[in-house]
């Protein structure tokens, strides 16, 4: 993606925001990362534990999955503006431990101005909606499902750009079979970018994880060993050591 001549513009820190109760439990407010004038935005739902600590979006395991999806299709994370619908980590207390949860409708509404102003400033050509929460928000339609809508370029009159839904990287951690289809969705995104932000041809299979397990580094390959065994039954043909 060519961002020549476009300065790197960061969001102003929102460290004083107390609009919703999430400020009471957050460690850091997680602002967007990257070039706010990038033609393509990557938008998720909310920070998790790692993002809450780092103050940056898409860290930890989900961030590594996102990085792998981008690098596999010759895309660079630095070329995108990356953000979330909600700026602070929503938590659920269970057995005296903090767990991630989806943001509530009220939390999303109270944080709405932040992401809306960012999109209005950046005027992207496309917004990649990563996961159900981002999809429903960006299309303003709670009936939409990521499993049915993923991989489609949907024109938004509101934002005057395409909304492109894909599975959230965290969903791949739970359902590793989503990796293949998401890799292909990112390959189609690459075609969109290379085609000067014009719609690409219908998607075709470009990448498969089972055929090329080396695409994942050793740490992730071992992490998902049991899921690979369960989903693809390739234990006898691929070394797991």
Image (spheres, helix red, strand yellow):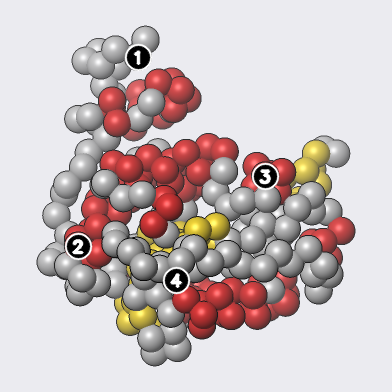
In the foreground, 211 or 123? 123
Q: Quick one: which residue is furthest to the top in this view?
A: 241
Q: Is residue 159 left or right of residue 14?
A: left
Of callouts 4 and 2, the N-terminal one: 4
Which residue corresponds to mark 2? 194
Q: Position of residue 101 (x, y in %)?
A: 67, 54
Real-space Cα distance between discs 2 and 3? Answer: 32 Å
Of callouts 2 and 3, the N-terminal one: 3
Real-space Cα distance between discs 3 and 1? Answer: 32 Å
Real-space Cα distance between discs 4 and 2? Answer: 17 Å
Q: Is residue 206 left or right of residue 5?
A: left
Of callouts 2 and 1, the N-terminal one: 2
- The image quarter in which residue 84 lies: bottom right
Q: Position of residue 44 (x, y in %)?
A: 52, 60
Tag 2–tag 3 contact (CB < 8 Å):
no
Tag 4–tag 2 contact (CB < 8 Å):
no
In the foreground, 96 or 126? 126
Which residue corresponds to mark 1? 240
Of callouts 4 and 1, the N-terminal one: 4
Which residue corresponds to mark 3? 54
- The image quarter in which residue 180 lies: top left
Q: Nearer the viewer, mark 4 or mark 3?
A: 4
Q: Residues within 10 Å of mark 3 (few under 14, many from 20)?
A: some
Real-space Cα distance between discs 4 and 1? Answer: 42 Å
In the foreground, 60 or 95? 60
Q: Residue at x 36, y 80 (%)?
A: 161
């Amino acid at each position: 993606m060519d961002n020549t001549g476009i300065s790197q513009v960061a969001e102003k820190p929102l460290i004083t925001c107390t609009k919703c109760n999430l400020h009471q439990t957050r460690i850091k407010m997680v602002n967007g990362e990257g070039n706010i004038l990038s033609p393509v935005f990557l938008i998720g739902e909310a920070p998790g534990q790692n993002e809450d600590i780092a103050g940056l979006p898409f860290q930890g395991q989900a961030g590594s999955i996102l990085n792998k999806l981008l690098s596999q299709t010759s895309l660079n994370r630095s070329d995108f503006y990356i953000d979330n619908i909600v700026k602070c980590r929503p938590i659920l207390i269970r057995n005296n431990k903090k767990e991630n949860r989806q943001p509530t409708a009220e939390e999303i509404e109270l944080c709405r101005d932040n992401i809306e102003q960012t999109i209005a400033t950046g005027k992207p050509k496309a917004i990649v909606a990563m996961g159900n929460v981002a999809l429903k928000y960006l299309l303003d339609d709670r009936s939409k499902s990521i499993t049915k809508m993923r991989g489609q370029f949907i024109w938004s009159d509101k934002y005057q750009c395409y909304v492109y839904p894909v599975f959230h990287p965290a969903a791949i951690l739970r359902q590793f079979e989503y990796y293949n289809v998401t890799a292909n969705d990112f390959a189609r995104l690459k075609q969109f970018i290379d085609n000067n932000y014009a719609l690409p041809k219908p998607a075709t299979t470009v990448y498969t994880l089972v055929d090329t397990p080396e695409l994942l580094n050793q740490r992730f390959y071992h992490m998902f060993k049991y899921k690979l065994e369960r989903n693809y039954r390739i234990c006898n043909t691929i070394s797991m050591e």
